[in-house]
Image: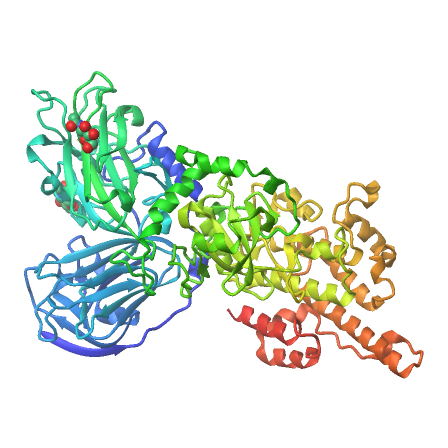
Amino acid sequence: MEIEKKSHKIQQKDSNLFLSSLPSTPMAFLLVLLFSFISKPTTVYSAGSASFIPQDNFLIDCGATNAANSPDGRVFKTEPQSSQFLQAEDDFKVSIPSADVPSPIYLTARIFVKDATYSFHMSHPGFHWVRLHFFPINNNVFDLQKATFTVTTNKYVLLHSFNVNNTNHAIVKEYLVNITDPQFSIKFAPQKNSAAFINAIEVVSAPDSLITDTATNLSPVTNFQGLPSFAFQTAYRVNMGGPLITPSNDTLGRTWVSDAEFLKNKNLAKSVTVAPSIVKYPEGGSPLIAPPMVYASASEMADAKVDQPKFNVTWNFDVDTAFGYMIRLHFCDIVSKALNNLYFNVYINQNMAIADLDLSHTMGALATSYYKDIVVNTSMMSNGLSVQIGPSNMGSGDLNAILNGVEVLKMSNTVDSLDGEFGVDGRQENPGSRRGTVAAVGFAMMFGAFVGLGAMVIKWHKRPQDWQKRNSFSSWLLPVHAGDNSFLASKTSVGSHKSGLYSSTLGLGRYFSFAELQEATKNFDSKAVIGVGGFGNVYLGEIDDGTKVAVKRGNPQSEQGITEFQTEIQMLSKLRHRHLVSLIGYCDENSEMILVYEYMSNGPFRDHLYGKNLASLSWKQRLEICIGAARGLHYLHTGTAQGIIHRDVKTTNILLDDNFTAKVSDFGLSKDAPMGQGHVSTAVKGSFGYLDPEYFRRQQLTDKSDVYSFGVVLLEALCARPALNPQLPREQVNLADWAMQWKRKGLLDKIIDPHLVGAINPESMKKFAEAAEKCLAEHGVDRPTMGDVLWNLEYALQLQEAFSQGKAAEEESKPSANAVAAAPVTPPVDAATSNRLATQPAAVNNVQGEVEDVNQHSGTAMFAELANLNGR
Ligand SMILES: *[C@@H]1O[C@H](CO)[C@@H](O)[C@H](O)[C@H]1NC(C)=O
Ligand SMILES: *[C@@H]1O[C@H](CO)[C@@H](O)[C@H](O)[C@H]1NC(C)=O
C-alpha cells in the first residue's frame, strides 16, 4: 500500500470552444420525438451499428500512477495527467496492489480530509454522464467504510451524507447532468471528523437525442415539458427477460441489470429472447437510446392462456419517494407473429401509463424499437414505484403483454438536489411546490389539455375590462424563442426557490411566493394594471417596506410555456445593467408564470414626447435619455460574450425611473446575436416604423437592426412625433423617410419639436442628426455600432451643455456675445478609435479626464463600462 500526500492548485484555462457549439434546438428534439413515436419506420440502423464520440470525455482514475483501462476498453487518466483538475488541501492517494475488483480503476483512491474540488473545462453544453465510482479499499489513512461525505456539482447536490454502508463492492453512482456552464465542478465535502473518497470519475457527453424536451405526465395525463431543466440519477436500468448488459455492450457505457430481482411474482412472467440482429430501429431512432440487446429480450406473461387468463406482471422498485422519477419504458414486439395481434396496458403505480398499446400499429412493423418517457411526480410516489403490464380488452389477438426494458431516473427536486431536501446553497425544499407538478401543469395550460384548468381559463375570460384597458407602459415580454436559445441563454439555470431567499449563486433574483404577490398587487386588482400585452397583464405592486414593483403575470392562455418562461428568466438574469430594466424576481408556484421587475415610475419615454400632455422634456434630458438607452443597447450587443439583439427598440421600450434615468425594457424578442454573420430568422419581428429595411428584405438579423431602430428613436426624440403616423399626408407617414428628406435639404430644424426651438444648440442638433442619419443607413454595414452612436450622443450633450453654460454666463455678465462659442468643447474621441481605447486602460484614463464634467450618467462611468465589457 502506498500513501502520498499532495496539494494541488487548480489551473483554469480559458477556451472559446464552447461558443461555437449550440445545443440542439427543441425543434430537433421534436423531430426525434416525431420520428421515434409517429412515423412509420424504415430501418436506418442495423443492430449494433451505433457509435458515438463524446465531445467531452473526462475519465479520471483517482490516485492512480499507472494508466488503467476499464474492462470496456476506455482509458482513464492517471494522477499526473489529471492533477490539473483537482483542487484540494489535505488529500491522500491510496492504492492496493491487487484485489478482486471488477476494474483496475478501483485499485486506487483519493481520500480528502477537507473539501476538495475537481473542475473541468467543458467544450460542449448539454447532458453529460457523471459517474462516480466508489470502492472502499483498505488503507491505513482512513476507514473508508466510515467515510461520510457530501458530493455536489456547481448546481446540484448529488450525494448528501453518503456512506458506503458496509458494502464491500464497487458502487457506481450515475447521473445525467445538463451542463450549461463551461466550468463544471464536482466537490467532495467530508462530514466533520470524517473523510471523503473517490476511486474514479467520469464526466462524458451524452448524445443530444438521449433526453428530449418532453415526456408524458402520469397523472393527470398531460404533456410534460422541460426535461432538460432537471438533473437525473439512474436509480435502475433493467433489461427485461435478458442478461446483464455491461458497459462493454452499450455504446454509452451503461449497465443494464436483469429484471428477476424486481419481479413481484416470478411465476407470472417468462423470458423471451431473439437474436439482437432482428431488432430494427425506426427512422430517427437509434441504438444509443438502448442497445439491440435490450430490445432483443422481453418479459411476457407466463402461461397467459390458462385458467385465469387476465393478470398483470408486476415489478417493484425500491426508491426514495421524496423525489419524482422519469420512467423510460422500452418495447419491441418480438413475440407477435402477425401485426395487430398484441394489445396491452402498462401501469405505473396503479395508474394507466399506456393504454391499449399495439406496438405493430405504433411502429408499423414488428421487432421495431419503441420507447416512452413517463414522469411520475412526487405526489404519485407515496407507495414506492411499481410497473405493471397486462392484457387490454382491445383486439382479439393473444392475451399477452411485454416489456423489454425500464429505466428509472430520479429527477432533481426544487432545490436542485438529488439527495436530501437541501440545495447546494442551503435552500430547503418546500414540499408544497414540487417542480415536477408545476411544470406539468404549466404545459397543460398551454395546450388546454387539462380539463381541470378550464375553470381558470374561464376566470380569465371573465375579466374583459382588464384586457381592453390599454396603458402604454409595457414591460412584459413576448416569448423568447426557445429554439434560438444559445448556450449563453441557458447558462444560468432555473429552479424554484424557497420563498424569500435570494438565490445569489444562480443570479435569478428573488423567489416570490404567489401569496406574497397577491398581497403586493391587492389580489391582482384590475385597478393596479399598468400594462396589458399578449403575455398577460402588468400590475403595480408593493413589496416589503413599500418598494414599488411591476408584476408581470403570465396569461394562462399565452403561448408562452413554462420552458419559455424559464428561458426568459435565464435571459434576463444574465443581463444586469444600469440602463436595462432589472428583474427583481419571479414566481412559478401553482403553475403561475410571474416576473417582478423594478418599477419605472415615469413610464415610457414616448409618453414624455407626445400624446400624453406631460411636461415637455428639455433637450438635455432627451439627450441623457438617449445616451442611457444607447448605453443599455451597447451593453446588450457587447456585454455578453455572444451579444444580444434586442429586436424591438422603440420609445415605448425605453422606460424612465424616478430620476428619468432611461432603461431599456422588453427583451422578449431578443436573440443572442451570432458572431460574425447575420442571423437568418424565419419570422420578422419588431414594430413597424422601426424596422430595419435590410432585415425586412433579407431576414438577416444583426445588431445593426437595433441601430436602425435606435435611429428612429433619435428622430422621435427630436421631432416629438410617432415613427409611423398614418393620419399624415403620405410623404410624412414614416418619420425616418420624412426626417431624412429634410436632413438632406439641411432643413431638419424646420420639423423639430416646437418646444425645442431656440433651446437647442444648433451644433448639438447637427451632431445628433448626423448620428441618426448614420443609424438609418440603408445597409447594416454602413451603420455605426451602438458604441459609436454613444460617442456621438455624448458629444452632442457636451455641445449642448457648453451652450447652456454659455447662456448662463451670458445672463450673468450681460454681454451679448455669441452663445455657442462661450465654452470650449473637446470632442470625446473619434468614434472609430473608441474600441481601441476601450481595451487600453491607459487611454481610458486619458479620456476620463476629458469628459469628467459630463453628468453622472456619462463620461467616466461609460469608459469604465466599456473597458469592463471589452475585457471580458
Ligand atoms: C458483449 O460484448 C463482448 C465484446 O464486444 C462480446 O464478446 C459479448 O458476446 C457481448 N455479450 C453479449 C451478452 O452479447
Ligand atoms: C392490473 O393493474 C391495474 C393497476 O394496478 C389494475 O387496475 C387492473 O385491474 C389489473 N388487471 C388485472 C387483470 O388484475
Residue at image position (34%, 63%) is 154
State the residue in front, 761 or 758.
758
State the residue in front, 521 or 381.
521
Quadrant of picture, ligand 1:
top left
> Where, quadrant-wise, is the N terminus in this rendering?
bottom left
State the residue in front, 383 or 44.
383
Q: Does 230 sit left or right of 613 as displayed?
A: left
- Residue furthest to the bottom: 813
Q: Position of residue 841 (x, y in %)?
A: 58, 78
Q: Does 645 sit left or right of 391 as displayed?
A: right
Residue at image position (66%, 67%) is 659
245, above or below 714, in the image: above
State the residue in front, 369 or 467.
467
- Which quarter of the picture shows residue 67? bottom left
- Which quarter of the picture shows residue 258? top left
Q: Position of residue 394 (x, y in %)?
A: 24, 19
Q: Position of residue 253 (x, y in %)?
A: 22, 50
Q: Is residue 283 visible?
A: no
Q: Position of residue 58 (x, y in %)?
A: 28, 60
92, above or below 328, in the image: below
